[in-house]
């Protein structure tokens, strides 16, 4: 005797055990999209949010590996100490100089180099690869190379400048408070401008050539084309590169750590280097956390203001 069609139909209990049935009901709900992003939210919370809030919480704690008996909650104590810290104020001043002159010079040279490389030809491709070499080199290698070239006794740069008559004798660039930071800025320029060159060159190659041809028909000069076509088309890339480079310079003390260690005196002391020294030389992680929070707030304010001002200028 054959089973009827009604008898072969699964029961409600059997349907409740079917995962496909549950999945079908779930995808029909209005919150399905939110369920899909839960893994991403958890990943962001674990990788980004937890370290950020952990660092902020650390800034309100006294945590010294050399004095564990003094560990505990100090509230705004570290921030009050920062207000009277002369080294901190000098580091803020040097950080401003380091970032403004560093990003400004690197962007200018990177844009000029990108405009020069935005041509067809085999040599331009080879030149593009050579330009990237300073950016490819690790910071430790680049800093030590320049430290040797600027050495007061054996440096090849001193030797060339003396022979050309620019200097009367070999100069200790990193031992002089007047030349230590400018010398470090030159090295940062050499290493950082390929970052702008690479991204700006990609933006230049994406600009439609017909725009330039139409401008030529209207009698526009090269400067007019650059000002009214090239720069507006590059604005999104300029905003992104400037923000990323500012963040990189504020947060990376590697070059100054190797070249000067913040000296002579505090002539090249910046916030990131000061935070590093407080954490890994003085083992004062709470104070270092407070400096890092100040850096975080400064970068957030800069990013928001810069992006809004740029958007307003575009509109």
Image (cartoon, rainbow, N blue to C red):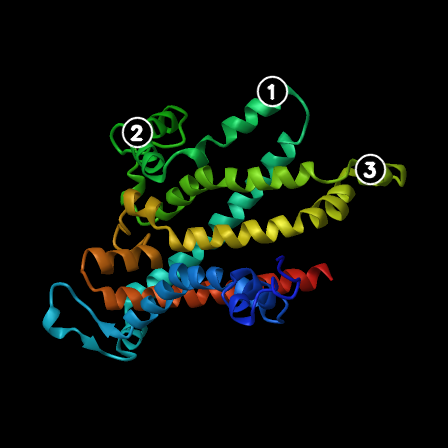
- Give residue 214's position: percent from left, percent from top: 86, 39
Left/right placement of residue 5 relative to residue 189 reads right
Separation (CA) of disc 3 from disc 2: 50 Å
Check the image and name the residue furthest to the right. Answer: 218
- Give residue 106's position: percent from left, percent from top: 51, 44
Circle nearer the viewer, 2 or 1: 1
Identified at 32% across, 40% down, the residue is 173
- Quadrant location of the C terminus? bottom right
- Please identify the quarter of the rendering in which residue 255 is found: top left
Q: Secondary structure at mark 3?
A: helix
Q: Secondary structure at mark 1?
A: helix
Left/right placement of residue 34 relative to residue 235 reads left
> Marks 3 and 2: CB-CB under 8 Å?
no
Between residues 208 and 12, which one lies in front from this camera angle?
Answer: 12
Q: Which residue is mark 1?
A: 123
Identified at 68% across, 28% down, the residue is 119
Separation (CA) of disc 2 from disc 1: 32 Å
Circle nearer the viewer, 3 or 1: 3
- Give residue 266's position: percent from left, percent from top: 28, 56
User: Is 98 rendered above or below residue 291?
Assistant: above
User: Is 32 rendered above or below residue 142?
Assistant: below
Circle nearer the viewer, 3 or 2: 3
Q: Which residue is mark 3?
A: 210
Q: Which residue is mark 2?
A: 155
Q: Residues within 10 Å of mark 3 (few under 14, many from 20)?
A: few
Sooner in the amino-acid sequence: mark 2 or mark 1 = 1
């Amino acid at each position: 005797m054959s089973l009827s069609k009604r008898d072969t139909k699964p029961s409600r209990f059997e349907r409740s055990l079917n995962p496909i049935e549950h999945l079908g009901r779930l995808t029909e709900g209005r919150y399905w999209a939110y369920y899909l992003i839960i893994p991403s939210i958890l990943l962001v919370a674990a990788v980004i949010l937890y370290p950020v809030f952990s660092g902020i919480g650390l800034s309100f704690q006294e945590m010294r590996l050399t004095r564990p008996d003094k560990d505990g909650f100090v509230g705004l104590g570290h921030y009050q100490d920062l207000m009277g810290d002369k080294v901190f104020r000098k580091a803020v001043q040097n950080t401003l100089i380091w970032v403004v002159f560093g990003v400004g010079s690197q962007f200018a040279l990177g844009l000029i180099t990108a405009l020069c490389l935005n041509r067809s030809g085999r040599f331009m491709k080879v030149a593009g690869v050579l330009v990237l070499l300073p950016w490819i080199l690790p910071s430790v290698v680049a800093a030590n190379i320049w430290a040797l070239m600027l050495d007061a006794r054996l440096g090849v740069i001193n030797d060339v400048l003396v022979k050309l008559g620019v200097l009367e004798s070999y100069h200790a660039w990193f031992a002089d408070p007047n030349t230590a930071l400018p010398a470090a800025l030159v090295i940062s320029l050499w290493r950082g401008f390929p970052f702008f060159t690479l991204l700006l060159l990609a933006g230049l190659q994406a600009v439609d050539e017909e725009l330039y041809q139409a401008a030529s028909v209207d009698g526009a000069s090269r400067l007019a084309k650059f000002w009214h076509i090239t720069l507006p088309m590059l604005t999104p890339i300029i905003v992104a590169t400037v923000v990323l480079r500012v963040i990189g310079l504020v947060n990376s003390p590697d070059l100054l750590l190797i070249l000067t260690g913040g000296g002579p005196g505090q002539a090249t002391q910046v916030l990131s280097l000061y935070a590093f020294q407080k954490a890994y030389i003085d083992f004062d992680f709470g104070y270092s956390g407070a400096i890092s929070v100040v850096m975080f707030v400064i970068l957030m304010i800069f990013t928001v203001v810069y992006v809004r001002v740029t958007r307003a200028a575009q509109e």
